[in-house]
Amino acid sequence: MATSTSKYEYIVCDPAACIGCQLCEYVCSYTKTGEYNSYRSRIRVVRMDEVLISAIACRTCENAPCVVVCPRDALTQDSESGIIRVDSTKCDGCAWCIEACDFGAISINPATKLAEICDQCETVEGGPQCVLWCPKEALTLTNPDRQAQKTRRDLIKDSLEFPTKTKDPR
């Protein structure tokens, strides 16, 4: 799986905690469109193998490839937050941004034919609703520094855990 190339905040999923309920997709679609439709969500729940499930949203990459590749300059990146915005007057749904995204975090709205990308619910009180409503707290709004600290803590914790002794079957 690709890793983030961002200095900005982004939504990350802990696949060990994700149960694949898709509540994040439904909350996102309702927040953005007023309907419960996972196809209209800007976060995607993906099954990576039989038991590993994760959710994927925009990683707000620095020098975002989706922005760079857009032939109509329809995508711009906020220099403060890293959030990618789509100019509906310029986007023609060519999907070059989808091809450029290493994370599979962009979709084309079938009705409007416009690119749709997670904006971390920047205009919604409380921030990303998917993070707030995740029943297993599998989603987190993080940045590379916080994510690296968490990874280090998890590695240390895992290295300190000893296997439990099992009873001798004799």
Image: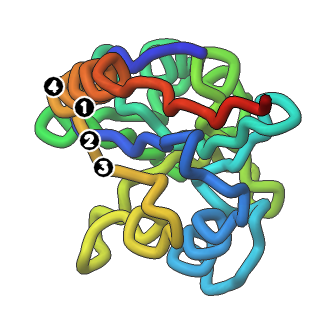
Q: Is residue 36 above or below residue 49?
A: below
Frontmost of labels 3 and 1 is: 1
Residue at 41% from the left image edge and 63% from the top image edge: 131
Precedes in sequence: disc 3 or disc 1: 3
Q: Give SS at disc 3.
A: strand
Q: Is residue 48 above or below residue 83?
A: above
Precedes in sequence: disc 2 or disc 1: 2
Residue at 58% from the left image edge and 65% from the top image edge: 24
Q: CA distance from mark 3 to mark 4?
A: 12 Å
Q: Is residue 62 left or right of residue 79?
A: right
Q: Is residue 149 left or right of residue 129?
A: left
Residue at 65% from the left image edge and 64% from the top image edge: 25
Q: Give SS at disc 4.
A: helix
Which residue is at the far left?
A: 80
x then y, percent, for residue 128: 36, 64
Q: Give SS at disc 1.
A: helix
x then y, percent, for residue 37: 77, 73
Frontmost of labels 4 and 1 is: 1
Q: CA distance from mark 2 to mark 3?
A: 4 Å
Amino acid on which disc 2 is placed = Thr
The residue wearing badge 4 is 145
Q: Marks 3 and 4: CB-CB under 8 Å? A: no
Amino acid on which disc 3 is placed = Leu
Q: CA distance from mark 4 to mark 2?
A: 8 Å
The residue wearing badge 1 is 150
Amino acid on which disc 1 is placed = Lys
x then y, percent, for residue 48: 77, 30
The residue wearing badge 3 is 141
The residue wearing badge 2 is 142
Q: Marks 2 and 1: CB-CB under 8 Å? A: yes
Amino acid on which disc 4 is placed = Asp
